[in-house]
Image (cartoon, rainbow, N blue to C red):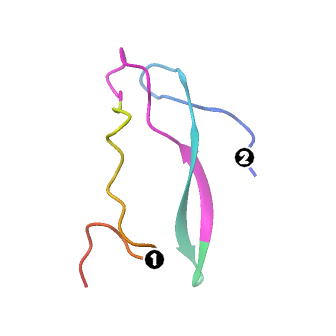
Amino acid sequence: MDSEEHACPVCGQPVETVVKRHKTLGAWVPVWVAGPCRNPECAAYAEPGAEREKGPPGKTAGKES
């Protein structure tokens, strides 16, 4: 597990750690990555309501089969 704190690459402020996933050998594996920057004075600032669209569980938002 990764125990270091993540920082914004633009302003250097600490950011939250979020869990994403990727598929390895047929299994979904969690990956801990840096979350969006919440510093309003930063060029990489992400609005609190500007999260990506979420679809139903098990589906990827934006992809159609």
Would residue 59 appear left or right of 27 to someone viewing this image? left
Mark number displayed over residue 2: 2
* x and y, in percent, of residue 8 in the image: 49, 28
Would residue 3 appear left or right of 58 to someone viewing this image? right
In the rendered image, the vertical position of residue 8 relative to residue 11, given as above or below: below
In the rendered structure, which segment of residues is drawn in magenta?
Answer: 29-45
Q: Nearer the viewer, mark 2 or mark 1?
A: 1
Q: CA distance from mark 2 to mark 1?
A: 26 Å
Mark 1 sits on what residue?
Answer: 58
* x and y, in percent, of residue 20 in the image: 53, 58
Q: Amino acid at mark 1?
A: Gly
- Is disc 1 surrounded by few (<14), some (14 to 19) or many (20+) residues within 10 Å? few
| SS category of the residue bearing label 2 | loop
Q: How many marks?
A: 2
* x and y, in percent, of residue 57 in the image: 45, 73
Q: Amino acid at mark 2?
A: Asp
Q: Main secondary structure of the magenta part?
A: loop
**Could you say which is closer to the camera, residue 56 or residue 5?**
56
Residue at 35% across / 33% down in the picture? 46
**Residue 34 falls inside the magenta stretch:** yes
| SS category of the residue bearing label 1 | loop
